Image: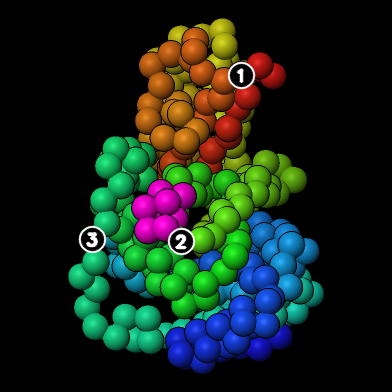
C-alpha cells in the first residue's frame, strides 16, 4: 500500500494502470475511518484490480468553520486500518494541493439541493460536488463507492456523474451500524460517553416512524418523531423528513410509491448527526 500526497503523482500512476487494463475502484473519505468505510474498501478490493482511498477533510463542504476545525483527523490510525482491506493507494493531499487557488466553481442540482441537508447546510453540496469532481478527474476510477448513510450525497454524486458524463459506476452500500443501532460515523468520535448513549435515539426515532408508516398519516408520524426526541437530553432535532429515495423530495402520501426514505438530522450536544432508513413499503 502506497501513500501519495501529490496530485500529479496519483494522476500519472492511475493513467499508467488504466493503460495496463487494470480496473480501478475509488472510495472517497474524510478519514477517521470506521467499519462503514472499511466495508466499502473491501467491496472495492473484491470488485477491482486496484483500490484507491482518499483521505481529505474538504474545507469547501463545511458551512461551519468550527465544524471543519474540530473534524477528527487520524491519518496514522487510518493508514493502519487500511492495511487489511486490500487498499493499494491512499491519496492524502493537502488543501493547498487540491485548491491551489480560490475555488470559484458553482454547481446547481435544482430541487435536490434545496431540501434537508441542502436547506440546512447552504453551500455544502457545492463543496461535495467540487471535491468529488476533482477526485474523479484525478483518479478516473471505473467504480466509486459510497455509503447509504449519506443518502442525499449519493443522489448528488449520481447527478454529477450523469451531468458531466463521467464513465463511472456508482456503488452504494447499506449503512453500517453499531450493535445498538447507531449509524457509524466519524463524528461519533466527538461524543462523550453520555452523548453516545443518547445518540441511538436518532435510530430509535426512525424505527418508530417505520413501524407507523403504512398506518398513520405522514404529518402525525413527523409529530410523533418530534415528540419522541423532545425530551431526550442534549438532542435537538433539526429535521425529520419522509421523502422519495431518489429525488429526496418530501412525500405527502405513500399511496403510489414503493419505497420511502426516512431521513433525520439532529444535534447531540455539539455534534451534528444524520441517519436514514429506506423502507420497502411492501415489507412494512
Residue in the foreground of this view, choosing between 156 and 62? 156
Mark toward the start of the polypeptide (1 vs 3): 3
Report the residue at 56% width, 8% height from top.
215
Q: Give the magenta-colored segment's residue range.
A: 158-165
Q: Residues within 10 Å of mark 3 (few under 14, many from 20)?
A: few
For label 1, the residue is 281
Image: 269 above or below 48:
above
138 to 183, vertically: above or below: below
Q: In the image, what residue occupies the spot 60% across and 49% down?
A: 172
Q: In which quadrant will I find the N terminus?
A: bottom right
Q: Which residue is mark 3?
A: 106
Q: Closer to the N terminus: mark 3 or mark 2?
A: 3
User: Around disc 2, counting alpha carbons within 10 Å, would you say few (fewer than 14), some (14 to 19), or many (20 or more)?
Assistant: some
Residue 45: % across, % down? 74, 68
* Callout 1–callout 3 Cβ contact below 8 Å: no
| Main SS, magenta residues | helix
Q: Position of residue 233 (x, y in %)?
A: 48, 39
Colouring scheme applied when the structure was drawn: rainbow
Gap between marks 1 and 3 measured at Cα: 37 Å
Per the image, label 2 sits on a secondary structure element best described as loop
Is residue 37 at all visible to an observer of this figure? yes
Q: Which residue does the numbered mark 2 point to in the structure image?
A: 166
Where residue 188 appears, as percent x and y from the top left, is 56, 57
- Asked if the stretch drawn in magenta spans residue 163, the answer is yes
Amino acid at each position: 500500500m502506497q501513500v501519495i500526497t501529490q496530485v500529479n503523482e496519483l494522476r500519472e500512476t492511475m493513467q499508467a494502470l488504466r493503460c495496463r487494463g487494470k480496473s480501478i475502484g475509488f472510495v472517497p473519505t474524510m478519514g477517521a475511518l470506521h467499519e462503514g468505510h472499511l466495508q466499502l474498501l473491501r467491496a472495492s478490493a473484491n470488485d477491482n484490480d486496484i483500490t484507491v482511498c482518499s483521505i481529505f477533510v474538504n474545507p469547501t463542504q463545511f458551512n461551519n468553520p468550527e465544524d471543519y476545525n474540530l473534524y477528527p483527523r487520524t491519518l496514522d490510525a487510518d493508514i493502519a486500518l487500511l492495511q487489511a482491506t486490500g487498499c493499494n493507494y491512499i491519496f492524502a493531499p493537502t488543501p493547498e494541493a487540491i485548491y491551489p487557488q480560490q475555488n470559484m466553481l458553482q454547481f446547481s442540482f435544482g430541487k435536490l439541493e434545496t431540501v434537508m441537508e441542502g436547506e440546512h447546510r447552504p453551500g455544502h453540496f457545492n463543496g461535495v460536488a467540487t471535491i468529488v469532481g476533482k477526485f474523479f478527474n484525478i483518479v478516473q476510477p471505473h467504480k466509486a463507492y459510497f455509503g447509504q448513510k449519506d443518502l442525499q450525497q449519493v443522489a448528488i454524486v449520481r447527478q454529477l456523474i450523469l451531468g458531466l458524463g463521467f464513465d463511472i459506476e456508482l456503488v452504494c452500500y447499506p449503512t453500517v451500524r453499531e450493535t445498538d443501532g447507531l449509524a457509524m460515523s466519524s463524528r461519533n468520535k466527538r461524543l462523550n460517553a453520555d452523548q453516545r448513549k443518547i445518540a441511538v435515539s436518532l435510530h430509535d426515532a426512525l424505527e418508530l416512524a417505520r413501524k407507523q408508516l403504512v398506518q398513520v398519516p405522514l404529518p402525525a408520524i413527523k409529530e410523533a418523531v418530534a415528540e419522541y426526541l423532545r425530551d431526550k437530553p442534549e438532542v435537538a432535532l433539526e429535521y425529520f423528513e419522509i421523502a422519495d429515495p431518489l429525488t429526496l423530495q418530501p412525500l405527502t402520501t405513500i399511496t403510489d410509491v414503493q419505497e420511502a426514505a426516512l431521513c433525520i438530522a439532529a444535534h447531540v450536544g455539539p455534534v451534528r448527526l444524520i441517519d436514514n432508513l429506506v423502507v420497502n413499503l411492501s415489507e412494512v
